[in-house]
Image: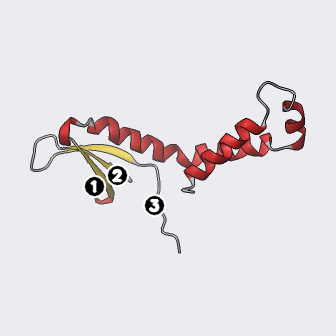
Amino acid sequence: MTQQHTPVPWVTKPFSGKYKNEGFCINATDEDATRIADVTNHYYVPSEANARFIVRACNAHEELLAVLELALRYLEHPDVLAVTQRMALPGSVPADRARAAIAKAKGG
């Protein structure tokens, strides 16, 4: 059985601990009990920007994947392929790129 990740949406919250302004944590909700990860300020890394980027990417992942899969189905349609073969950028080029991106997003 494949283990699922913590459901989205995720949020970021500042935290401090032993050291003042340690960084930001990623939570599944606003509750501290659902902490997923800590993004700390080690070595001058911009922890807030990194934490917000991780959250934004995770929250958008499924929707972006679904839209890309829909676009790929459109690009693979025989009518679209026939029309785009005469164009400067045939439909097979973005279709190949979409397939590669989908595989990467799915961990393949």
C-alpha gap between disc 3 and disc 2: 12 Å
Q: Secondary structure at mark 3?
A: loop
Mark seen at residue 93: none
C-alpha gap between disc 1 and disc 2: 7 Å
Label 3 crowd (10 A; few <14 / some 14-19 / many >=20): few
Instruction: Judge by depth and name the residue closer to the eye, 75 or 13.
Output: 75
Above/below status of 37 relative to 60: below
C-alpha gap between disc 3 and disc 1: 17 Å
For discs 3 and 2, the disc positioned in front in the rendered view: 3
Q: Name the amino acid type tagged 3.
A: His
Q: Name the amino acid type tagged 2.
A: Asn
Residue identified by numbered label 2: 27
Q: Secondary structure at mark 1?
A: helix
Mark seen at residue 32: 1
Instruction: Judge by depth and name the residue closer to the eye, 45 or 56.
Output: 45
Residue identified by numbered label 3: 5
Q: Name the amino acid type tagged 1.
A: Asp
